[in-house]
Amino acid sequence: MSELIVKAEKLTKVYKLFAEEIAAVNNVDLEITAGDFISIMGPSGSGKTTLLDMIGCLDSITSGRLEILGKDVSAMAESKLVNVRRGKIGFIFQDFSLIPTLTALENVQLASYFAGNSQKTQKLTVFLEKVGLTHRANHLPKQLSGGEKQRVAIARALATQPKFLLADEPTGHLDTENSLEILNVFKQLNQEEGLTIIVATHDQRLGSQTKRIVYLQDGKITPS
Ligand SMILES: Nc1ncnc2c1ncn2[C@@H]1O[C@H](COP(=O)(O)OP(=O)(O)O)[C@@H](O)[C@H]1O
Ligand SMILES: [Mg+2]
């Protein structure tokens, strides 16, 4: 049996805004095993980011149960959550979040350093190679296309040697051609390296190419 990466039972997140309570994620049951490539789809406001943030141990949960990499994180303090995610979860965001004053390779190097890895700079080019960007190692983010920036962000996530990748709307700021580039990188990482990838997206082209789709509506999983 494959290793369980995520196990959510009646997972719920309620945001309180003045007198109003919003169940951004509402009683979600979800299991994700090693090697999966899954997209979480749904309209804007359906709870994709909230669900991803809980899975990524970036946000606390309101009720229910959540196990990440075999650890029950349901009641874990923020200070402990850091240890669950650091070096184990690779994050990719819509806006790339690269450091503008660092080159592609330096962005990768910084992430590797903070994950506690002590690889030599030259060794780190292997992560740029995995996303087909060896020739852009010394370029600054502003010298790269959107798709290339996102590929650097993927290389940076890989450099932390994570157990799984979480990508929130990774093609949200990209045109069709660049989106396909990113999709192909994910597919390759999943197929060739068996990397588990969880993507939140409203991009049907991306979603339709993953192994599995979970649809969210008003914080609930809807039957597909
Ligand atoms: N920090 C927050 N405080 C209050 N409400 C929030 C917060 N983050 C998200 N929400 C609300 O939770 C719901 C789900 O949001 P979100 O998870 O961002 O959805 P999606 O990523 O699918 O667009 C929305 O109604 C949103 O307004
Ligand atoms: Mg979102």
Image: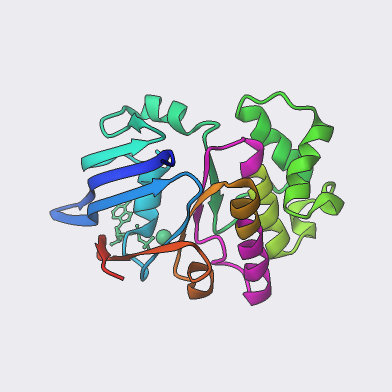
Name the residue at 61% across, 57% down: 186
Residue 104, horizontal then vertical, whole percent: 76, 47
Q: In the drawing, does residue 155 fall left or right of residue 169?
A: right
Residue 187, horizontal then vertical, whole percent: 61, 59
Name the residue at 71% across, 40% down: 108
For this rendering, which residue is in front, 209 or 169? 209
| Quadrant where the image shows the N terminus | top left
| Quadrant where the image shows the C terminus | bottom left
Q: Residue furthest left?
A: 19
> Considering only vertical position in the picture, is 191 above or below 177?
above
Q: Is residue 95 magenta?
A: no
For this rendering, which residue is in front, 94 or 67? 67
Q: Which residues make up the magenta segment? A: 157-186
Residue 161, horizontal then vertical, whole percent: 61, 35
Name the residue at 68% across, 66% down: 181
Residue 158, horizontal then vertical, whole percent: 64, 42
**Which color scheme did the rendering employ for the protein?**
rainbow
Judged from the image, the quadrant occupied by ligand 2 is: bottom left
Give the quarter of the image for residue 151.
bottom right
Instruction: Specify whether residue 102 is in view.
Output: no
